[in-house]
């Protein structure tokens, strides 16, 4: 392959990575040093269940892509063997990787981009403790139903006491 073709190929990969960083609601960078191929396969399967894509790229390519995407702060974290999780949900990649990291201590958060903001390890850890989108929606519905349920209980109690007064 000629050097021009190689350069074009690499530029295409960098553009693809930059586009994934920009388009994903969440991009999480983890170090996977010491994990087996079976462990990485398990991570990919768990992430795939929630439409999260896990890729391994050369750090040089991701450095260029991060700059292209406007996230230069990410560059300093791109040392060593890194995996990149791209998700349509802001919470899912961090939550799934944190769960996996509890079993496999060698998997470590490094940094991430969530809704256009670069997060450090502490930010990703906090994010990983949130429920997924469905969980958040059910919590919201529960909070909205609570006042309605309370008003209904008051009306029911008033109605029952009025019935008791009429019977007496």
Image: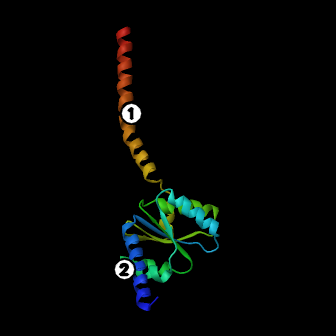
Q: Residue 17 falls in which quadrant of the image?
A: bottom left
Residue nearer the viewer, 146 or 54: 54
Residue nearer the viewer, 163 or 86: 86
Labelled disc at residue 149: 1
161 lies above or below 113:
above
| Image coords of residue 63 (percent x, y) | 44, 81
The residue at the point 39 percent across, 33 percent down is 149
Residue 105 can be seen, yes or no = no
Label located before the other in sequence (2 or 1): 2
51 lies above or below 23:
above
The residue at the point 44 percent across, 91 percent down is 3
Callout count: 2
Residue nearer the viewer, 165 or 119: 119
| Image coords of residue 55 (percent x, y) | 50, 70
Q: Secondary structure at mark 1?
A: helix
* Quadrant (top left/top right/bottom left/bottom right) for the C terminus: top left
Q: Residue 34 falls in which quadrant of the image?
A: bottom right
The residue at the point 36 percent across, 76 percent down is 69
Residue nearer the viewer, 59 or 110: 59
Q: Label 2, on which residue?
A: 68
């Amino acid at each position: 392959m000629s050097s021009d073709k190689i350069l074009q190929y690499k530029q295409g990969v960098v553009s693809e990575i930059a586009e994934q960083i920009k388009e994903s609601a969440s991009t999480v960078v983890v170090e996977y040093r010491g994990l087996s191929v079976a462990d990485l396969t398990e991570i990919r399967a768990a992430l795939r269940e929630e439409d999260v894509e896990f890729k391994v790229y050369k750090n040089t390519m991701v450095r260029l892509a991060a700059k292209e995407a406007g996230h230069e702060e990410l560059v300093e974290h791109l040392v060593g063997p890194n995996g990149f999780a791209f998700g349509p949900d802001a919470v899912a990649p961090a939550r799934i990787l944190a769960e996996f990291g509890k079993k496999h201590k060698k998997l470590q958060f490094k940094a991430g981009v969530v809704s256009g903001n670069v997060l450090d390890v502490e930010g990703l850890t906090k994010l990983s403790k949130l429920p997924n989108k469905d969980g958040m929606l059910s919590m919201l519905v529960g909070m909205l139903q609570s006042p309605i349920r309370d008003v209904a209980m008051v009306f029911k109690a008033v109605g029952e006491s009025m019935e008791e007064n009429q019977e007496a």
